[in-house]
Amino acid sequence: MTSLKKERSSNFSESEIRLLVDVVIKHSKIIECAKSDSVTWKEKNNAWTQLITEFNSATSALIPRTTKSLKTKYEGLKKELRKKKAIEKQELFKTGGGEPVKTTFTDWEEKLLILISITCEGLAPINDCDSAVAERYLPTLQNHNLLIYYFILTGTKISSINELAEAKIALSKMQLQLTEAEMQFKTEEHQLRINALQNEYVLKQKCLEMDLEIKIKQRDVQAAILEGLELDNDKKRLELQKV
């Protein structure tokens, strides 16, 4: 009896992964569409057919990839990336003190982060507490609210994922400048508070010295009055003795 073994495709190389991410981004509007009606499914199938053609024509592999293998790999990349982001978030909010372990992302992971965070998860609401915390302590590609504000303030128009990534980098630089300015402001504010406390201490010391000087003078005056009264009494006693 002859045993039939299922042929296993080779592992994806780094260049193939980058290419897959790039071609998926090109068709992401259809592939990552949240709709599930028949028309959308047909458009998705057509998009994957076009995507597999573009992918295989851009590679030099002897055995072309199938649509199934690309879909499986793409879903696997997203799954692993979400796990990586979850670990990053756990490190950020873990208790016990110490600096969180910094998570690094490759260039294609950065692109895919933008894609799955905006296309799949949607834009975060303005009052989203978790989003606000993340934006303050770890600027990432999911800073949707800040990106929106950045687009409005600068009038930037985004027509591709790459332009969105560049806008995010520009936004991160702005955030860094704001953070540095805030730190400088807090440093100056702290120094002003210290100066105010020092001035207050000096004034209190001067007031205490003046109070002490006044009390000494009052004591001297009282002593002089008493001395004068004693002299008057002595004079009166002498006069009475003469009489």
Image: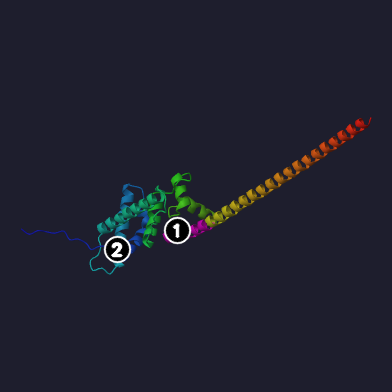
Q: Which label was assigned to residue 121?
A: none
In what quadrant of the picture does the C terminus appear?
top right
Write down the residue under mark 2. 53
Q: Nearer the viewer, residue 122 or 94?
A: 94
Query: Hey, which quadrant is residue 237 in on the image?
Result: top right
SS type, badge 1: helix
Q: Residue at x 46, y 58 (%)?
A: 168
Q: Residue at x 75, y 42 (%)?
A: 216
Could you tell me if residue 236 is visible in this image? Answer: yes
Residue furthest right in the image: 243
Residue 74 position, x and y percent, is 30, 57
Q: How many marks?
A: 2
| Closer to viewer: mark 1 or mark 2 | 1
Callout 2, which amino acid?
Thr
In what quadrant of the picture does the N terminus appear?
bottom left
Please say if 84 is above or below 241: below
SS type, badge 2: helix
Could you tell me if residue 158 is visible in this image? Answer: no
Callout 1, which amino acid?
Leu
Q: Residue at x 28, y 57 (%)?
A: 73
Please say if 224 is above or below 46: above
Q: Residue at x 89, y 35 (%)?
A: 235
Main SS of residues in magenta: helix
Mark 1–mark 2 Cα distance, whole angstroms, equals 26 Å
Q: Would residue 240 be found to the left or right of residue 135 on screen?
A: right
Q: Which region shows up in magenta?
A: 159-177
Residue 13 position, x and y percent, is 29, 65
Q: Which label was assigned to residue 164?
A: 1
Residue 37 position, x and y percent, is 33, 46
